[in-house]
Amino acid sequence: MATLVIPKEYGYVVLTGVSSAFLITYLAMNVGKARKKFKVEYPKMYDDKEIVFNCYQRAHQNTLENYPQYLMLLLIGGLKHPIVCSVGGLVWILGRIAYAHGYYTGDPSKRMYGGFGYLGLFAMLGSTAHFALDLLGVL
């Protein structure tokens, strides 16, 4: 049986998680502003005429689609590697901001400006896998 001691540096992981909640709120607010600007009424998720609005909506929706795995990797991997996961989590957040602002241009290919965020996700993935293997006694 493994004993888990949560390192004090896990506080950085918690703060990174809190920061990600602000990211989600920021993206949601931008969709709300775009909804008013482009006059896209509720409950429509997307609009056939307002492509730029759709880009705002997709930037937020895609982030929500990726958020569960982000949180899992951040919170679990951070138990063993809190600094690596916190930094990786912040890189992911910055990548999502760049992704959204690229998408907001109305040219969906510019969302790839945020591709660097995957570096943070991969760091968290490696940290979480390392933690799992350590728990299993493989390492």
Image (tube, rainbow, N blue to C red):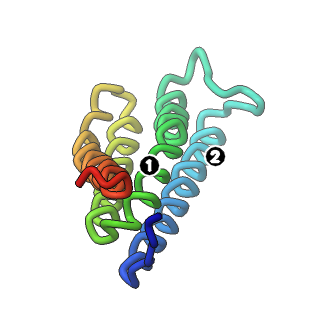
Residue assigned mark 1: 70
Q: Position of residue 136 (x, y in %)?
A: 36, 52
Give the crowd class for mark 2: few <14, some 14-19, many >=20 residues within 10 Å: some
Which residue is most to the right? 43
Where's the C terminus, which quadrant? bottom left
Callout 2: SS: helix
Residue 100 visible within the image = yes
The amino acid type, in three-letter code, at marker 2 is Gly
Q: Residue at x 53, y 45 (%)?
A: 68
Residue assigned mark 2: 32
Q: Position of residue 6 (x, y in %)?
A: 44, 77
Q: Is residue 61 above or below residue 92?
A: above
Residue 117 visible within the image = no
Which residue is most to the bottom? 8
Q: Position of residue 53 (x, y in %)?
A: 54, 31
Q: Residue at x 49, y 23 (%)?
A: 51
The amino acid type, in three-letter code, at marker 1 is Tyr
In the displayed structure image, the side of residue 28 where residue 135 appears, left or right:
left
